[in-house]
Amino acid sequence: MSAQTLTLVHDHRSQSGPTVATALICDSFLLRSALENILRDTPFAISETASVTGPRRVYHCAANTALMIIEASQNTGRVLEVIKQVKGLSPETQIVALADQFNLSFVQTAYEAGVTGFCLTTGGPEVLIKALELVMLGESVLPFEVVRSIIDRTPLDQPLQGSTAGSKLSDLKECKLSAREAQILICLTEGAPNKIIARKFDITEATIKVHVKAILRKIGVANRTQAAMWASERLPRQGGPSSNV
């Protein structure tokens, strides 16, 4: 477990807004300590801590917890059990999985179980905090490394199940996306957040949100992570993968 890659920071500005009751489900003492330091003086107030392998504490953590961060580098079977238990007890709780790396099989299964954020321990503290903010705003977060593996068609573990090759292009045509929606869908496959997409096309973030909602409705998926996976199986390859933004 590379907990040391999460650099400790102490310069976050104090937050005056409402706090987010946050539970840490983590077996690694070093990682837990790092997270406690990173989240200090942010809106994410740690209300509970527990171990992935400590089932009785999970029920306590689920109550009145708005956000749960769970270590997912090891014991992934048990991690999925905990996620399902927490969502069963508290469907409104947002869950973020944290690991050294993710494979597509786990991402798909964890998402279906209720995880909406996937963050790497190799990222910086500010990246983690921004990801947590996006999750609490109802967005889904997926590391670009995973998105890139989809685009490159070289899965980290095994391919996601999808439509047959013969139906992919017809799927795109039947969705009747506008030119702008198609452009934004490509950006979603690159892992770009709304702010970056808005800057690229010189339009407001509010307009991007409207387009994203329309895209999700037209292609029949629940969130931008599913949209990225859906599009990567259908959009034609155009040279090498785009760089992360």
Image (cartoon, rainbow, N blue to C red):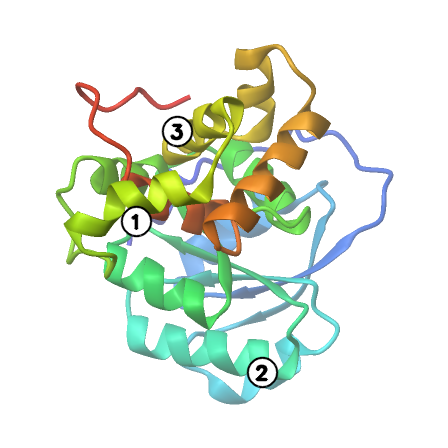
Q: Residue at x 37, y 35 (%)?
A: 189
Judge from the rendering whether residue 146 lies leftward or rightward of residue 187; answer left or right: left
Q: Position of residue 9 (x, y in %)?
A: 56, 33
Name the image quarter holding the N terminus.
Answer: bottom left
Q: Which residue is mark 3?
A: 186
Q: Residue at x 21, y 21 (%)?
A: 238
Q: Position of residue 207 (x, y in %)?
A: 69, 26
Name the image quarter holding the C terminus.
Answer: top left
CA–CA distance in space, label 1 to label 3: 26 Å
Q: Which mark is residue 60?
A: none
Q: Residues within 10 Å of mark 2 (few under 14, many from 20)?
A: some
Q: Is residue 129 visible?
A: no
Q: Amino acid at mark 3?
A: Ile
Q: Is residue 173 visible?
A: yes
Q: Position of residue 156 (x, y in %)?
A: 17, 50
Q: Which residue is mark 1?
A: 100
Of tags 1 and 2, the one toward the viewer is: 2
Vertical side of 229 occupied by 198: above or below: above
Q: Amino acid at mark 2?
A: Gly
Q: Residue at x 42, y 51 (%)?
A: 226
Q: Amino acid at mark 1?
A: Asp
Q: Nearer the viewer, residue 166 or 196?
A: 166
Q: How many marks?
A: 3
Q: Which residue is mark 2?
A: 88
Give the mark nearer the N terminus: 1 vs 3.
Answer: 1
CA–CA distance in space, label 3 to label 2: 34 Å
